[in-house]
Image: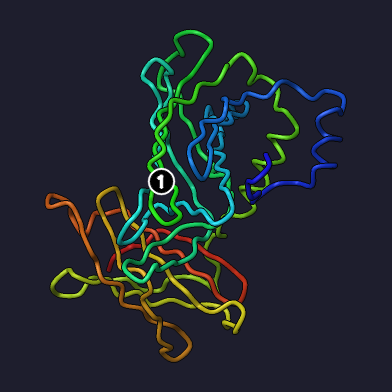
Amino acid sequence: MTGFQTGFRFPLLALALLAISPGAGSAATSPWAETEGGRVRLIVLPEEADGRIPALLDIELQPGWKTYWRDPGESGISPTVTMAPESGLVVEAIRFPLPKRFSDGFTAYTGYDRSLALPLTLKRQQATQGDRITASVFLGVCENICIPLQAELSVDMAKVSVANPIEAAMAAAAEAALPAAASPDFAVTEARWNTEGSALSVTFTAPEPSAEKPLQVFVSGPEGFQFETGAAPVRSGESYRVDVPLRHKPKAASLDDAALLFTAESGGRAMEMPLVID
């Protein structure tokens, strides 16, 4: 692992102790798929009582390299994961920790400059054909240029009956790094499109920002939607308001029915919630 940054990782000693602890099962983990600047693998955990299967897209980056959020902004490739039909599974959700904004002087984009693990939720639609499942993964890693990473990641489902403590700990850390749900002091109170449908106006409450942890907001939508990055919130009484321009949407997409997410950070806290358009 030399040369790779580690994001949500435990110290090597702790991992070594977990690896030799009694009851540590085999990892239900694909081999690494590597490219210049980074590598990626799929980790699958045991099926839960509701039938959903937690998993991780584990992304390791070399120093100086970046990857992208679900809405990459003006440039970039957001991560996608598609299960092979014979796997009998679909990806119900990919969740992302709070991103950062970047600019290279020509374009602005949103993503990460560190290694990270994205929590996935897999849902069974039919029986798996055989013992292995395969996922097609596509994402971008960039330094001075963006390099697409496309890979077929395969996992032996026979090894998913018992969670390996290392992978279970990684999954818990990845979940803990996600933005929290809305709370009374950190939530959207109103969201509406402007008359032209070219910008979304959001009013929200938020903790007091600090110099180290300023207030920043992100809006993201379904595939094909792109919002401007860097919109500046303004204070309005006890609340804040931000107008976020819509850069692109599919022609046939409805603004009123689009599933939009509002993500914000302020004062060291992060929050994410679906938007209900008034």
Q: Residue at x 62, y 26 (%)?
A: 46
Q: Does 262 appear above or below 96?
A: below
The residue furthest top is 130
Residue 64 falls in which quadrant of the image?
bottom right
Whether residue 227 sits left or right of residue 58 in the image: it is left
Residue 121 position within the rendered picture, expressed as x and y whole percent measured from the top left: 50, 36
- At 52% across and 64% down in the image, what residue appears? 271
In the image, 267: left or right of 202?
right
- Residue located 58% across and 28% down the image: 44
> Which residue corresponds to the image point at 60% horizontal and 69% vertical from the top-left?
269
Residue 149 position within the rendered picture, expressed as x and y whole percent measured from the top left: 41, 38
SS of the residue at dot 1?
strand
Number of disc labels: 1
Q: Amino acid at mark 1?
A: Gly
Give the vertical position of 235 relative to 254 (above or below).
below
Determine which residue is flagged by label 1.
Answer: 140
Q: Is residue 45 left or right of residue 129?
A: right
Mark 1 neighbour class, 10 Å CA radius: few under 14, some 14 to 19, many 20 or more: many
Quarter of the image with the N terminus is top right
Between residues 154 and 221, which one lies in front from this camera angle?
Answer: 154
Which colour assignment does the render follow?
A: rainbow
Quadrant assignment for the C terminus: bottom left
